[in-house]
Amino acid sequence: MLRQVIHRGLQSFFYKLGLFVSRHPVFFLTVPAVLTIIFGFSLLNRFQPDTDLESLVAPSHSLAKIERSLASSLFSLDQSKSQLYSDLHTPGRYGRVILLSKPGGNILHQADVILQIHRAVLEMKVNYKGYNYTFSHLCVLRNQDKKCVLDDIISVLEDLRQAALSNKTTARVQVSYPNTKLKDGRSSFIGHQLGGVMEVPNSKDQRVKSARAIQITYYLQTYGSATQDLIGEKWESEFCKLMHKMQLDHQDLQLYSLASFSLWKDFHQTSLLARGKILVSLMLILLTATLSSSMKDCLRSKPFLGLLGVLTICISSVTAAGIFFITDGKYNSTLLGIPFFAMGHGTKGVFELLSGWRRTRENLPFKDRVADAYSDVMVSYTMTSSLYFIAFGMGASPFTNIEAVKVFCQNMCVSILLNYFYIFSFFGSCLVFAGQLEQNRYHSIFCCKIPSAEYLDRKPVWFQTMMNDGHQHTSHHETNPYQHHFIQHFLREHYNEWITNIYVKPFVVILYLIYASFSFMGCLQINDGANIINLLASESPSVSYALIQQKYFSNYSPVIGFYIYEPLEYWNGTVQEDLKTLSQGFNTVSWIEQYYQFLRVGNISATNKSDFISILQSSFLKKPEFQHFKNDIIFSKAGDENNIIASRLYLVARTSENTQREAVELLEKLRPLSLIQSIKFIVFNPTFVFMDHYGLSVTMPVLISGFGILLVLILTFFLVIHPLGNFWLILSVTSIELGVLGLMTLWNVDMDCISILCLIYTLNFAIDHCAPLLYTFVLATEHTRTQCIKNSLQEHGTAILQNVSSFLIGLVPLLFVPSNLTFTLFKCLLLAGSCTLLHCFVILPVFLTFFPPSKKHHKKKKRAKRKEREEIECIEIQENPDHVTAV
C-alpha cells in the first residue's frame, strides 16, 4: 500500500510540474539560457590548468609523505636528489638525457662526443631580466667543495677520453658494473647511469665489455622562490631545445630528454590533442540523435527535439564548468571524461521524454500531453539521477584518497544536478513548443502548415513524401501512429519475436556463460595503474623517454634511502649483524659498510663508542675517497662526547623490466621490518609517494560508490513499486560491472584513476538503462512473461537503443586521440555501453522469461474478471430478452 501511495504521489507531483512547465515555457527556456551565458563567461575568464601532478594522481594521505617529511627533516632532499635516484618522479627541477648508440654499437667508444654534449649543457645560457644564467649558477652544490653535483658517469667518460688521447685502449680503463672505482678512489654505483650492459665473460669484478646507453641528470637548486623557479623552468626549456638540436648534429646517437615539467606538459597535452576530436564527437552525437528522432511522418517526426536535447546537455555542461572555475577549480586532463559521462546520462532523459510523449494520447491538448509525459518518465529519471548523485557524491567524499578522482566526482555531481534541472526546464520547454506545433498541424522541419489530404493528392510524389503527415496510417485499425517510428517498428515486428524464440534462448544462455567466464578470468588478473605514463599523451617525449628508460635502465630499482633516525650502537656486533640482515640481497651504498671495511683493512679495533666515533671523524671521513659520507651522518656533541644521532645509507635491488611493481613489493617488505626490528628506521624514495597503497587508494571510490548504491537499493526494497524490480536491478548491475571490470583487464587496462571513474559511471549507466525495462516488466499484467518482456522492450527499447547508439558513436573520435588517457577512456566506456546493450536486449529478455516474477496470478485475475463480466451480461440478457432481438 505504501509503495503505491509513494508512486502515485510522485506521479502526481511530476504531472503538476509538467503542467507548470507547459504553461510557462518561455520562463523555463530563458532562465537556463541566461545561467549558461553568465557561467560561460566565467569559464573563459577563470580557466586555469592544474600544474601539480603529484597532488592530483598521488594518494593524498599516505605513509610515504610522512616518511618524506621525516627524511627531509634529517637530511635535505634537495642535496640528496642525485643519490635518491627515481625514474620519473625526481623532486624539484632537473634535466635528464639518455644517449643511445646504434644497435651493435658501444656507447663507451663515443665518450668524446658525449662530453661535447655535456659541455654544451654546462655552457648553455638562460637570460632573465638582462642577466645570463648557466648551469653553474643554478646547480645543486656539494657540501665538501661547493662544486656542482654531477653524475659519476661523467668522470668515467673523462677517464676513457684521456685514455684514448694517450693512445691507451679503453680496455685498460676498467669500468665495472654496477659499482665502479673512480679515479679519486671512490666506489660509485652507476647502475642507473649505464644501460644495456654486456659484461666480460667470467669476469670476477664484473667488468663492462660494452654498453648501449648512458643516462645523465643535471640537478637544479630548489629554494622555493618564484624567481628561482622561473629561471629553472627557462633552463629546462632551453635544455630540451638543446637536446633536440644536438640530435640533429649527432645522427649516430639517439637522444631522449626529460625535464621536471615534461610530465605535467604531456599530461596537459591530452586536452589540447582532444579538443578537435571532442567537437567531432559532439557533431556525431547531434547527427545520431537527430536521425534517430526522425520519422517519415512530417507531423510527428521530432528531429529538432533530438538535436535540442543534445544541446541541452551541452549548455548544462558549460554551466557546470563555469561553476567549477568560479569556485577556484583548476582544470586537469582527467576532466575530459565529464562531457561523455554527462551526455550518456542526459540524453537518456531526453529520449525517455520523447518516448513518453509518443505514448500519450493524441486527442489530448499538448499541455496535458507534456504533463502525462513528465508523470510517466520523470519518476524513473529522478531515481536514476539520485543514484548518480549518490555514487559520485560518495566518490567525492573524504574517503577518496586520489585528488583527481575527488575533483572529477565533485564536478560530476554538479553536472548531474544541472542536467536534471535543464532537462525538465529547457528541454521541457522545447517539448512544449514542439507539441504546440504538432497540435496545430505544422511541419516538424519546415514549420509550415501541412496541407489537406485532398490538396496533397493533386501534388507530385516528392511533395507528398515531404508533406506526408501519416493520414493514410491513422485509420480505425491504427491506435498509435507513433508505432511507425523505424526503431519501434523493428523491435515490434522483428526483434521481439526473434529474441523470445525458444530456439534462440539456449544460444543466449551459452553466450552469457562465455561472457561470465571471460569476466571472471579478467577479474583475477587486475593490475593497479600506478605508472604515470598511463595518463600521458602516447606520442609525447615523456612516454618515449620512459619506454627507453624501462628497456635499458630497469636492472636496478630506484635507490631506496634507509634512514636510521635514532642513536644506535654501531660498534656493537649484534647491531652490525642486524644491519647486514636488513641489507641482505641489496646492492648497498653505505658509509657503515665502507667504514667496517676500512677498519678491517687497517687492522684497527673500534669496539667501543669513543674509539668508533673518534676514528670515524679523525681518520675515515678525512680521506678524499670517503669525504662524501659526511653528508650521511648527523653528529651531536654533549660536552666532550660526540654521538651519532642519525645516519642514512642507500639500498638498490636487482629488478626486471617491471620496476615499479617490484619497487612497491620492496616497500611492502621493508616497512613492516621497521616495526619489529630493534633498529628504528624509515625507507623513502620519491617514487613511493606515487605508489604507496595506490591500489587501495584508487579502488576505494568505486567500492564506496557501489556499496552506497547497493545500500540505497536494499533500503528502498519496500518503498519501490515491486521489490523484485530492485532485486533484478542489483543482479543486472553487478553482472555488467563485473563484466566491464574483467573485460577491460583482458584489454590491458590497468586500475588507474580514469578506469576507476569509468567503473563508477558503469554502475549508474547500467541502472539508467536497466531500471525502466525491469520495473515495466515486473509491473506488467500480461498473461505470460514473454508477452511482458515484449511490451517492456517496445515501451523502453527505443529510448535505450537511441541513447546507447548515440553514446557509442560519440566515443569513436576518442580512438584517434594519441593519448593513453583517452585510450583508457574509450575502452572502458565502450565496454560499459556494449555490456549494458547486451544485457538490455539479449540477456535480460531471455532470462526474465525463466525466472520470477510469475505472471500466473495476473492471468487468474483476468479470467476471474472475464467470467464475472460474462455472468453479468447473461443476467442482463435474461432480464431483457428483447435486447437480443433488437441487436
Image: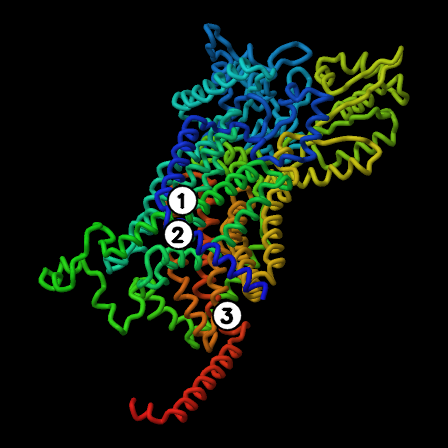
Circle 1 is placed at which residue position? 313
Task: Classify mark 1: residues with Cα within 10 Å, few (<14), some (14-19) or many (20+).
Answer: many
- Whether the residues at callouts 2 and 1 have beta carbons within 8 Å, the answer is yes
Q: Which mark is residue 847?
A: 3
Relative to 601, is 741 above or below? below
Sequence-first disc among 2 and 3: 2
Q: What's the distance in space between the residues labelled 2 and 1, CA to CA?
A: 9 Å
The image quadrant of residue 838 is bottom left
Mark nearer the N terminus (2 vs 1): 1
Looking at the picture, which amino acid does disc 3 mark?
Phe
Q: Identify the residue at horizontal 44%, vertical 59% (top origin).
A: 376
Kindly identify the amino acid type of the residue bearing the numbered disc 1.
Ile
In the image, residue 144 sits, relative to residue 300, either above or below, namely: above
Q: Which residue is mark 2?
A: 350
Residue 71 visible in image: yes
**Label 2 CA crowd tier, 10 Å (few <14, some 14–19, many 20+):** many
Say which quarter of the image contains residue 139: top right
Residue 371 locus on image (x, y percent): 40, 56
Write the residue at 58% across / 44% down: 395
Specify the quadrant that holds the N terminus.
bottom right
Near-viewer residue (328 or 868)? 868
For mark 2, give the secondary structure. Answer: helix
